[in-house]
């Protein structure tokens, strides 16, 4: 089985903290319905009725949206940690 691999290189943004969307990765088969896009309705036994997959909405495909959230890390610098007396 072949596998698609991509490398993502992160570097801190100039804007400090916040969220940014890195990319949209399309073309993956839905793992819930295995790419069928449907299931047989288990509530109707005497007929074969297809219902759309609740995860992919019946498309059989899913996409990944990679978003990075930048937040402060570590402890406050010592010069800001205590109240300065004047």
Image (tube, rainbow, N blue to C red):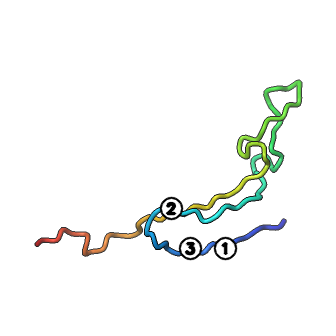
The image's mark for residue 10 is: 3
Vertical comparison of 45 with 13: above or below: above
Vertical comparison of 63 with 79: above or below: above
The image's mark for residue 15 is: none
Marks 1 and 2: CB-CB under 8 Å?
no
Residue 24 locus on image (x, y percent): 67, 61
Name the residue furthest left: 86
Residue 2 locus on image (x, y percent): 82, 67
Name the residue furthest top: 46
For the residue labelled by badge 2, is the local secondary structure a helix, a strand or a loop? strand
Vertical comparison of 68 with 31: above or below: below
Marks 3 and 2: CB-CB under 8 Å?
no
Query: Residue 9 sits in which quadrant?
Result: bottom right
Query: Reading the chain from its start, which is encountered first: label 1 or label 2?
Result: 1
Query: Residue 63 sits in which quadrant?
Result: bottom right
For the residue labelled by badge 3, is the local secondary structure a helix, a strand or a loop? loop
Observer-nearest residue: 26 or 31?
26
Left or right for 49, reference 17: right
Measure the C-alpha gap from mark 1 to mark 3: 10 Å
Query: Residue 64 sits in which quadrant?
Result: bottom right
Residue under numbered circle 2: 19
Measure the C-alpha gap from mark 1 to mark 2: 20 Å
Label 2: few (<14), some or many (≥20) within 10 Å? few
Residue 55 locus on image (x, y percent): 71, 45
The image's mark for residue 7 is: 1
Query: Reading the chain from its start, which is encountered first: label 3 or label 2?
Result: 3
Label 3: few (<14), some or many (≥20) within 10 Å? few
């Amino acid at each position: 089985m072949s596998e698609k691999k991509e490398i993502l290189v992160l570097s801190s943004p100039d804007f400090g903290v916040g969220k940014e969307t890195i990319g949209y990765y399309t073309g993956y088969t839905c793992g819930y319905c295995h790419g069928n896009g449907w299931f047989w309705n288990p509530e109707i036994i005497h007929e074969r009725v297809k219902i759309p997959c609740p995860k992919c909405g019946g498309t059989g495909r899913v996409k990944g949206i990679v978003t990075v959230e930048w937040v402060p890390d570590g402890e406050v610098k010592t010069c800001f940690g205590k109240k300065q007396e004047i």
